[in-house]
Image (tube, helix red, strand yellow):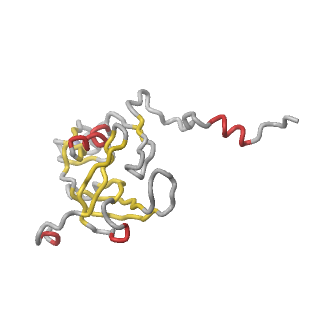
Amino acid sequence: MAGPPGPDGDERRHQGREQPSGVEPATPPGRVDAQGAGCLVDRRVITEASRPFWTGGAQRQLLILWCAACELWVHPPRETCPGCDGALVPRAASGRGRVFTFTVNRHAYNPAVPVPYVIAIVELEEQPGLRFITNIVGCDPEAVRIGLPVQVDFEPAGEAWAPVFRPAEPAGSGEAAE
Ligand SMILES: [Zn+2]
């Protein structure tokens, strides 16, 4: 009666194991499951280079790698400066930026994360092209638009703090000032 194992059986054997992606770091310092925070990523690996970015929120700082020689902000995190191959140090960015582009997700991929929520690419004011994928929180998803001024906030996610963004407070008369 026992037939050959079907694909279901094979799949089941792999559940609970690491996916055979072959990209595991040699010594993962910590794998974070974001439970309801940082909706975007529910599994991520913190590397030595990316640790400041993921943990700076504990001091409410958005830490981005910076090259003192080139005065270049560098993100995603990497070991050395793409401009001069020099050392990079974490530096606190202002946390201010604008929505570069976004989408509203209405499908509950993760039951722990209520929908709808906004996945966006935010460009920081420090440097053209200094962008990363994040969530926009603290407002009606329908109110998000391209170019919206935003301010960083942080949501706890295990040992990490996921940088997310809220609409910036209107600074008196200053929103249109550049
Ligand atoms: Zn450099």
Quadrant of residue 81 in the image?
top left
Question: In percent of the image, x 61 and y 37: which residue is there?
Answer: 15
Question: In percent of the image, x 44 and y 32: which residue is there?
Answer: 25
Q: Residue furthest left?
A: 173
In the depicted structure, whether residue 109 falls above or below residue 171 = above
Q: Is residue 32 left or right of residue 147?
A: right
Q: Is residue 176 left or right of residue 106?
A: left
Q: Is residue 127 left or right of residue 54?
A: left
- Tell me residue 138's x, y (percent): 30, 61
Quadrant of residue 142 in the image?
bottom left
In the depicted structure, whether residue 5 falls above or below residue 101 = above
Q: Residue furthest top?
A: 27
Quarter occupied by the N terminus: top right
- Tell me residue 84's x, y (percent): 24, 41
Tally of numbered discs: 0
Residue closer to the observer: 125 or 39: 39
- Tell me residue 16's x, y (percent): 57, 35
Quarter occupied by the C terminus: bottom left
In the depicted structure, whether residue 58 falls above or below residue 96 = above
Q: Residue furthest right?
A: 1
- Tell me residue 2's x, y (percent): 85, 34
Question: In percent of the image, x 63 and y 36: which residue is there?
Answer: 14
Question: In percent of the image, x 38 and y 49: which residue is there?
Answer: 37
Locate ligand 1 by image quadrant: top left
Q: Is residue 3 left or right of residue 86?
A: right
